[in-house]
Amino acid sequence: MTVLNLTEKTEKQIRRAGAEAYPDECCGILLGTEDGDGHVVRSLRPVVNARESGEQYHRFLITAEEMMQAELEARRLGLDIIGFYHSHPDHPAAPSAYDRDHALPFYHYVILRVANGRPEDMTDWRLRLSREAFDAENLKIEP
């Protein structure tokens, strides 16, 4: 099990994005560095959910163009894409079967539960190499 370190600022940014997107899902990209026991998020790249409007309440889409722009930004900042975040409106902060089918191993997947427009639980997950399931990771918030 690894650790994903967020600052209070990045945690608040994710929570605010989830509340603002409600009742739809927010999404974005985590830029950061590797640490001895995990990763540190140094910057967020918020992304407009590109899923068709009737599906945004339970699905998100980050386009290839957004990924390319995020990769260029990460390189410019001396960082790596270390994962993604998205919200689950009125659902638990745990990966869905859809999340598993569209995830890749090695990345962190931060999920924020937003209940009735209020951000609640935030969790971190990593997909197993076998792709059969996610494992919960340690999410640490630092000042």
Image (cartoon, helix red, strand yellow):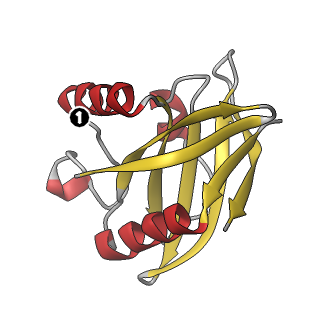
At a point 29% along the width and 41% down the height, the residue shown is 61
In the rendered image, the vertical position of residue 94 relative to residue 9, given as above or below: above
Badge 1 local density, few (<14 within 10 Å), some, or many (20+)? Answer: some
Q: Which residue is mark 1?
A: 66
| Placement of the C terminus among the 4 image quadrants | bottom right
In front here: 58 or 68?
68
Residue at horizontal 31%, vertical 65%? 24
Task: Please state which of residues 4 and 59 is positioned toward the viewer in this rendering.
Answer: 4
- Of residues 117 and 108, the one nearer the viewer is 108
In the rendered structure, which amino acid carries the disc numbered 1?
Answer: Glu
Residue 128 location (% of width, % of height) = 70, 24
Left or right of 16 on screen, residue 95: right
The reply to whether residue 89 is in sight is no
Q: x, y (%) of residue 47?
A: 27, 49
Give SS at disc 1. helix
The image shows residue 66 at horizontal and vertical percentages of 23, 34
Q: Residue at x 16, y 48 (%)?
A: 52
Q: Percent position (x, y) of residue 80? A: 48, 28
